[in-house]
Image (spheres, helix red, strand yellow):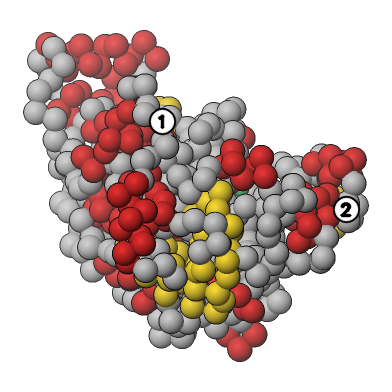
Amino acid sequence: MKKKAEWPRKLRSQEWFGGTGKNAIMHRSWMKNQGLPADTFDGRPIIGICNTWSELTPCNAHLRDLAERVKRGVYEAGGFPVEFPVFSVGESTLRPTAMMFRNLAAMDVEEAIRGNPVDGVVLLGGCDKTTPSLLMGAASVDIPVILVSGGPMLNGKWRGKDVGSGTAIWQFSEMVKSGEMSLAEFMDAEQGMARSAGSCMTMGTASTMASMAEALGMTLPGNAAIPAVDARRRVISQLSGRRIVDMVKEDLKPSDVLTRQAFENAIRVNGAVGGSTNAVLHLLALAGRIGVDLTLDDWDRLGRDVPTIVNLQPSGKHLMEEFYYAGGLPVVIKAVGEMGLLHKDALTVTGDTIWNGVKDVTNYNDDVIVPREKALTQSGGIAVLRGNLAPKGCVLKPSAASPHLMQHTGRAVVFESIEDYHARINRDDLDIDETCVMVLKYCGPKGYPGMAEVGNMGLPPKVLKKGITDMIRISDARMSGTAYGTVILHTAPEAADGGPLALVENGDMIAVDVPARTIRLDVSDDELARRRAAWVSPVKPQKGGYGGLYVNTVMQADTGADLDFLVGTRGSVVERDSH
Ligand SMILES: CC[C@@](C)(O)[C@@H](O)C(=O)O
């Protein structure tokens, strides 16, 4: 257990506000325009509330309310809270894709924390990318932080049935194509899909990343699953506000919590919850920030023996409300511990071990959090495949895939871009059947740019009309955490970076063997060399700006797609004053 720092002691914020110098008076006097008593600056912890609130990020639109609850807790514990906004990355609307801006938002978080007089920070996130961008930025500064999630929406409802965020969109749009549902019904269902504040209530990327933050030890226990509009979401916000003040006094920093053990715990918990493939990218990038040597192979190795025991869409049946009522993530962490797959003594932001935070919890619904022998899949972790089509790896989520496609060889049907896919997929003369392998190129970090969630390409109507709902799909794209199917993603190197994916042609045979973890393009090395010599990238260059910086510096998916110059921790010290 980490030794607590001496208290009282002089805090970082006193470098701005302490003493009688001209600059201290300047810093204090301007702050006082907000109506602050003089003793606000007496050396008490100043707590930033780093808020990704935005009305353009619907999942985070309620975070101002939670910030007020955090403030109550900070005041109660004797701190002074200051709320500040950072770039809010909304998955559902931001173009070309939210992933392109995760690193920009992380840069914003990092510089806003470092450059300002705060001693600790409460990170408020919800939507997919907001959680990793907050954690990545904070990790690069390494002062005490605690994360509070916005929480999931209430279950979607339509005609008396549950409708899961995202998952229903993919299902219903395929049903419209196959003729099982009318467009009018689809649009009617739309009204009931997002019934309250909060993020996706499936185990999509938002809930996955909230679960990852909790499993990493960066939140209070139980944070991930509390619905956004449940009164207990406000309570955990207030308690987190209290806790950060003590964390500042103890000097408990991200580098104390985000250890190799914490990442191993999170990877295993991701397998147990059937979490989003996006978590692979975000945890690799976060590990890079905090200096933990984590690789794609760790994901495969650590996840292999983990059964998926959370029966939530898209892998299973239920939604986040049921998960919370069943006991939420602490029950899952406890179960992982009982399987012998948890580093029980990993430290969390509570100042105590992860095990002590979960060991006494009860599972109130074993159809939602199922026993190991009834697992959705016994091997729930992310599978990492390699071969001449993906020398640096690609990923697949077995819990959301079809068992009959785990070993399959099929003829490639190639889409040279997402536009090419949209133009041809509905055509009757497209030469495709369910045994084929759909291949999509140029949707990776540099290619799209930003690695959009387009990897779960919808099936051709003529296949859907036969009642077939899954085919193998391969790309360098991502997919939504709410999506499902035998979808192979994050192929590295990506096509736009000259990866072999760029060289696949219609009619090539592709062999996928998930148990053996291989993916093979059945084309000779000589022929691939001939194709490579003739290859010209079709990707248009960016017109400068952030897009230019991004494509020039983004790393490949196998290391988490951070910008190369952002890897690592740069500390909290700023040597020069502003005046
Ligand atoms: C459109 C937003 C989603 C559903 O893609 C995302 O939240 C995810 O789960 O990956």
Residue type at the position of mark 2 = Gly
For disc 1, the marked residue is: 540
Q: Residue at x 83, y 60 (%)?
A: 465
Q: Is residue 368 above or below residue 59?
A: below
Where residue 299 sits: x, y (%)?
38, 69
Q: Quadrant of residue 413?
A: bottom right
Numbered label attached to residue 179: 2
Please give left or right for residue 298 compared with residue 63 in the image.
Answer: left
Residue type at the position of mark 1 = Lys
Q: Is residue 99 above or below residue 34?
A: below
Residue 295 visible to the viewer: yes
Q: Report the front residue among 128 and 518.
A: 518
Q: Residue at x 81, y 66 (%)?
A: 467
Q: Residue at x 68, y 57 (%)?
A: 431
Is disc 2's CB within 8 Å of ligand 1?
A: no
Residue contact at pointers 1 and 2, CB within 8 angstroms: no
Q: Is residue 228 above or below residue 17?
A: below
Where residue 152 sits: x, y (%)?
62, 50
In the rendered view of the protein, which quadrant contains the N terminus?
bottom left
Q: CA distance from mark 1 to mark 2?
A: 37 Å
Please give left or right for residue 185 compared with residue 498 in the image.
Answer: right
Q: Tally the numbered discs.
A: 2
Crowding around mark 2 (Cα neighbors within 10 Å: few <14, some 14 to 19, many 20+) is: few
Residue located farthest toward the bottom when viewing the structure as drawn: 373
Q: Residue at x 64, y 85 (%)?
A: 374
